[in-house]
């Protein structure tokens, strides 16, 4: 699998807390059997209600790094949320913190969700707002996000970081490797044998 | 068997027993005892199996139900909504192809996956369970470790009966004392989320303990564990006790005869002992909890029914922007009382509050009254079993003569993937779990979360009311 060590791209700031996955992709777009076409509906209702929404602004089209707030991706476990962001163009998310199911879904799709402190996010947001063509680099190896000459530390759950930088974020491939070990665990559990 | 004096809590005991190995990333490969699926988050996972030529490792430990997109009025096939019909066809075909039992509309056990699973006796203490739905935490009511997962992980569990997951810490959330009359499990869980915040549980599994949870029946415990995810916790659980064992007796998937006695002994032995260790502890007094109502756009933005909506100044600086956004969306003012807020719609249902005891409590309030003029009220049982039991008890007649619509089982207006939706700026008193912007089907629609009895009270009075005045 592809190793994901660093992402360099323009950024889009969305400095709001507790953005839930219903807002990222409203439930009516979950009436589908594939993830195709979800990109155009990312933040659809927020965009309809707010012409100034960053996802509506021409200067941020083509951005690949989303600058988020606290507890980004809370609520529903729908993988349609990272899928819609990914298909819109998001390749990495830098936020203050992330909801856990969303974080796991992103990792499974090769999208690193990394944490930076609020002051770093404020400065990065200000920089890309002032100059939207600015490219940021999220580096998972040396654990920094850089913007021109400025560099800020980032953190990420170590297991997820390791799996991305070593190209081991295809969990399915790893999990099926040890089927016999899995069956042994199952056999030791009394409920798997109907308490016989 | 674990000893009573063990310092290991239930979560860590179950985790260790289900650990297959530690992955190179440091995450645990965890065995999953039961896998529940539904029509929304599974089709892409089945396709992932096909793409890789994989099969389902334990089809007999996998159960499918249909719930999210199910119309609650006209269920004739094909559904009027072509996209919903396509999803139904997909889960029918996928379950046939991969040998998975499907609780389809013609099955008397069909219902919301988190209502149907426990009813069938599938959810048991000491097991692990996963489902591609965040409210899988519901099953923790049985002392089961239950994780909501995304679609990629649904494929993982299909193919390997395991998932990759980092070990969370465990927080004991104690609510001592006694809930007052007219204060329900929903109020207790909304209160905990209000106090700990929507991200307070990130990194944690919640163990709910104390007199209040000990006294609850299994359905009330499910309401509490269901909302764990709204507090940010990875899962939530309550230790198994005699209430749990009694609930499980004679369920279709429960062990029978002497095997049941062996099971009961094992189940009870999973519980955290009095000396168990926790990474964190918080405590609340159950007697202080009031009927609770959300006023904002996340489940922590709530107040007691007799309190006022807070002022921005009462929040820490970093939360004030969010508070103002919520007030603007809801069109509420700071310091406005929540009681007396006019509602347009009343919804009793969802995996949080659609079980028989929820309907009984709501019916008690509705009996002999009528839904207020201009209020549209609907009751959507969580499963066909709940529906049948309610009709046996005559609850449907109470609701219907009070002016509520009595519908077929499904998720319905909790997330409005079926035809049941808010329209425009409508305000809905709802027994569901999320008051997110646009959650109930209208992008600008508004949701006030509360207990089913409080929803019934609001439906009758046409405004948010204190149900205690009607009991």
Image (cartoon, rainbow, N blue to C red):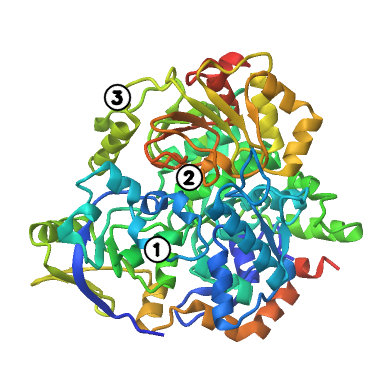
Q: Taking B40 as reference, is A181 left or right?
A: right
Q: Which mark is residue A37?
A: 1
Residue B282: mark in rendering: 2
Residue in view at x 38 percent, y 55 percent: A73
Residue marked by disc 3? B333
Whole-angstrom CA distance, mark 3 to mark 2, is 32 Å
Q: Chain letter of disc 2?
A: B
Q: Position of residue A118 (x, y in %)?
A: 22, 55
Q: Which residue sits at x=11%, y=67%?
A: A134
Q: Which quadrant does the N terminus of chain B fall into?
A: bottom right
Is there one chain holding both mark 3 and mark 1? no
Tell which tag, 3 or 2, sits nearer the viewer.
3
Q: What SS does tag 2 mark?
A: strand
User: Does residue A70 appear in this view?
Assistant: yes
Most extreme residue toward the right, as rendered? Answer: B257
Label 2 crowd bin: few (<14), some (14–19), many (20+), radius 10 Å: few
Instruction: Give residue A19's position: percent from left, percent from top.
Output: 34, 50
């Amino acid at each position: 699998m592809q190793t994901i060590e660093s992402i360099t791209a323009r950024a889009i700031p969305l400095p709001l807390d507790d953005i839930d996955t219903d807002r990222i992709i409203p439930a009516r777009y979950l009436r589908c059997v594939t993830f195709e076409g979800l990109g155009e509906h990312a933040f659809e209702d927020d965009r309809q209600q707010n012409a100034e929404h960053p996802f509506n602004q021409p200067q941020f089209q083509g951005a690949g790094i989303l600058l988020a707030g606290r507890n980004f991706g809370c609520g529903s476990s729908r993988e349609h949320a990272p899928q819609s962001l990914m298909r819109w163009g998001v390749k990495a998310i830098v936020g203050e913190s992330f909801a856990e199911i969303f974080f796991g879904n992103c990792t499974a799709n090769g999208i690193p969700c990394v944490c930076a402190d609020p002051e770093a996010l404020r400065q990065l947001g200000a920089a890309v707002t002032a100059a939207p063509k600015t490219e940021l680099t999220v580096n998972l190896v040396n654990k920094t996000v850089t913007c021109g000459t400025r560099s800020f530390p980032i953190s990420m759950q170590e297991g997820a970081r390791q799996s991305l930088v070593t190209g081991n974020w295809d969990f399915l491939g790893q999990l099926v490797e040890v089927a016999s070990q899995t069956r042994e665990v199952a056999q030791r559990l009394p409920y798997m044998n109907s308490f016989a | 068997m674990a000893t009573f004096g063990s310092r290991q809590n239930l979560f860590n005991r179950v985790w260790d027993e289900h650990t297959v190995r530690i992955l190179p990333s440091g995450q645990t490969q965890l065995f999953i005892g039961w896998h529940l699926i539904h029509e929304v988050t599974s089709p892409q996972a089945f396709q992932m199996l096909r793409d890789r030529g994989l099969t389902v490792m334990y089809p007999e430990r996998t159960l499918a139900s249909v719930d999210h997109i199910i119309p609650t009025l006209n269920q004739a096939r094909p559904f009027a909504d072509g996209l919903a019909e396509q999803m139904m066809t997909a889960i029918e075909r996928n379950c046939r192809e991969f040998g998975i039992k499907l609780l389809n509309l013609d099955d008397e056990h069909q219902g919301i996956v988190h209502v149907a699973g426990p009813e069938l006796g599938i959810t048991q203490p000491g097991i692990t369970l996963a489902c591609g739905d965040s409210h899988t935490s519901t099953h923790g009511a049985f002392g089961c470790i239950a994780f909501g997962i995304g679609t990629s992980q649904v494929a993982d569990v299909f193919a390997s009966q395991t998932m990759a997951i980092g070990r969370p810490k465990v927080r004991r959330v104690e609510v001592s004392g006694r809930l007052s009359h007219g204060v329900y499990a929903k109020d207790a869980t909304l209160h905990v989320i209000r106090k700990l915040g929507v991200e307070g549980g990130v990194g944690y599994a919640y163990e709910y303990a104390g007199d209040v949870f000990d006294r609850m029946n299994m359905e009330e415990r499910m309401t509490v564990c269901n909302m764990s995810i709204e507090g940010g916790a990875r899962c939530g659980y309550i230790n198994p006790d005699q209430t749990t064992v009694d609930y499980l007796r004679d369920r279709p998937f429960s062990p029978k005869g002497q095997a049941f006695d062996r099971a009961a002994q094992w189940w009870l032995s999973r519980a955290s002992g009095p000396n168990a260790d926790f990474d964190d502890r918080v405590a609340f007094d159950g007697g202080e909890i009031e009927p609770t109502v959300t006023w904002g756009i996340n489940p922590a933005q709530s107040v007691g029914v007799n309190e006022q909506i807070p002022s921005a100044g009462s929040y820490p600086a970093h939360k004030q922007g969010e508070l103002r956004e919520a007030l603007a969306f809801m069109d509420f003012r700071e310091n406005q009382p929540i009681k007396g807020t006019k509602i347009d719609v009343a919804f009793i249902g969802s995996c949080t509050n659609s079980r028989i005891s929820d309907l009984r409590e709501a019916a008690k309030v509705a009996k002999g009254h009528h839904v207020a003029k201009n209020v549209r009220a609907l009751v959507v049982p969580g499963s066909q079993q709940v529906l049948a039991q309610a009709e046996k008890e005559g609850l449907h007649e109470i609701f219907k003569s009070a002016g509520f619509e009595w519908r077929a089982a499904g998720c319905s207006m909790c997330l409005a993937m079926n035809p049941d939706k808010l329209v425009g700026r409508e305000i809905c008193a709802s027994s569901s779990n999320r008051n997110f912007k646009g959650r109930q089907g209208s992008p600008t629609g508004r949701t006030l979360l509360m207990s089913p009895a409080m929803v019934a009270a609001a439906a009758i009075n046409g405004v948010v009311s204190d149900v205690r005045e009607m009991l």
